[in-house]
C-alpha cells in the first residue's frame, strides 16, 4: 500500500458531545468565586464543604512558598559551611518539604469532611514559617555571640600577657627553682 486516499467523510463532533452545561465541574475546575458562592444552589453540604476546602487550599498555598524558602535557609545555616555536611541537610530539607505537602493534602481532605478544621489549613504554613524563622534567628544570634566572645577572649588574653611578669619562679619541695 503506497497511496492512501479518502473520499469525503464528515462527522459533526457536537452531536457526540454533551453540552457544557450538562457536565458537573469538579471543585478544582472552578473559579475561586464559584467555590465560595457556588452558582448551583442545589448542592448538598458535603459538596459545599469540598468547595470550601478547595477554596481555602488555594488561598493557603502561596504561604508554602515562604515556608519552603525559610526552611531551606534554616537548614543551610544550621551547620558548618562544608560540602560534605550540606548533603545531609539538603536531604532533610527535601524530607521536610515532602512531609509538609503530605500534611497540607491531609488537612485539605480533613477540611472537606469536617469544615470546622479549615483554620488548620492556614495554621500549618504559618506555624512552619514561625518555627523556621525562630530557628534561623537563633542560629544567626548564636554565631554572632560566638564571634563576639572569641574577639573579647582574644583581647583579654593579650591584656593578661601584657600584665604578666617577665620571669616566673617555681617552688618545688619548698625550694625555689628558676
Image (cartoon, rainbow, N blue to C red):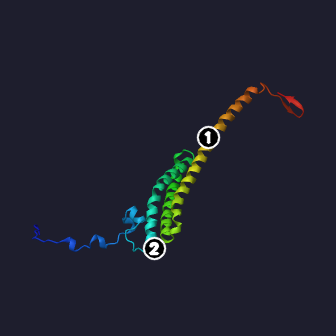
Residue 63: image location, x then y, percent: 48, 55
Q: Residue at x 53, y 62 (%)?
A: 119
Asked whether 92 or 21 is in front, the reply is 21
Residue 37: image location, x then y, percent: 41, 66
Above or below, 129 against 39 in this view is above
Location of the N terminus by quadrant is bottom left
Location of the C terminus by quadrant is top right
**Count of marks, rendered view:** 2
Above or below, 51 against 69 in this view is below
**Residue that mark 1 sits on:** 144
**Residue that mark 2 sits on:** 45
Q: Quadrant of residue 31?
A: bottom left
Q: Judge from the rendering whether residue 50 lies leftward or rightward of residue 92; answer left or right.
A: left
Q: Residue furthest right?
A: 174
Q: Residue at x 45, y 73 (%)?
A: 46
Asked whether 55 or 9 is in front, the reply is 55
Above or below, 16 against 176 in this view is below
Residue 151: image location, x then y, percent: 65, 34
Above or below, 151 against 60 in this view is above
Q: Judge from the rendering whether residue 19 lies leftward or rightward of residue 131; answer left or right.
A: left
The kind of secondary structure element at disc 2 is: helix
The kind of secondary structure element at disc 1 is: helix
> 10 Å neighbourhood of mark 1: few (<14), some, or many (≥20)?
few
Q: CA distance from mark 2 to mark 1?
A: 55 Å
Instruction: Return the disc, 2 or 1, that comes first in the chain's sequence.
Output: 2
Select label 2 or label 1 by which is in front. 2
Q: Residue at x 79, y 25 (%)?
A: 167
Amino acid at each position: 500500500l503506497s497511496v492512501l486516499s479518502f473520499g469525503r467523510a464528515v462527522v459533526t463532533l457536537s452531536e457526540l458531545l454533551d453540552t457544557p452545561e450538562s457536565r458537573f465541574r469538579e471543585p478544582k475546575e472552578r473559579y475561586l468565586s464559584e467555590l465560595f458562592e457556588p452558582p448551583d444552589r442545589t448542592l448538598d453540604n458535603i459538596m459545599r464543604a469540598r468547595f470550601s476546602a478547595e477554596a481555602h487550599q488555594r488561598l493557603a498555598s502561596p504561604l508554602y512558598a515562604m515556608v519552603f524558602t525559610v526552611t531551606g535557609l534554616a537548614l543551610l545555616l544550621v551547620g558548618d559551611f562544608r560540602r560534605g555536611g550540606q548533603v545531609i541537610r539538603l536531604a532533610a530539607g527535601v524530607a521536610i518539604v515532602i512531609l509538609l505537602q503530605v500534611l497540607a493534602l491531609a488537612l485539605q481532605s480533613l477540611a472537606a469532611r469536617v469544615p470546622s478544621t479549615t483554620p488548620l489549613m492556614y495554621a500549618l504554613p504559618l506555624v512552619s514559617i514561625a518555627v523556621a524563622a525562630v530557628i534561623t534567628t537563633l542560629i544567626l544570634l548564636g554565631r554572632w555571640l560566638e564571634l563576639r566572645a572569641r574577639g573579647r577572649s582574644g583581647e583579654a588574653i593579650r591584656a593578661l600577657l601584657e600584665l604578666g611578669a617577665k620571669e616566673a619562679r617555681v617552688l618545688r619541695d619548698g625550694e625555689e627553682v628558676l
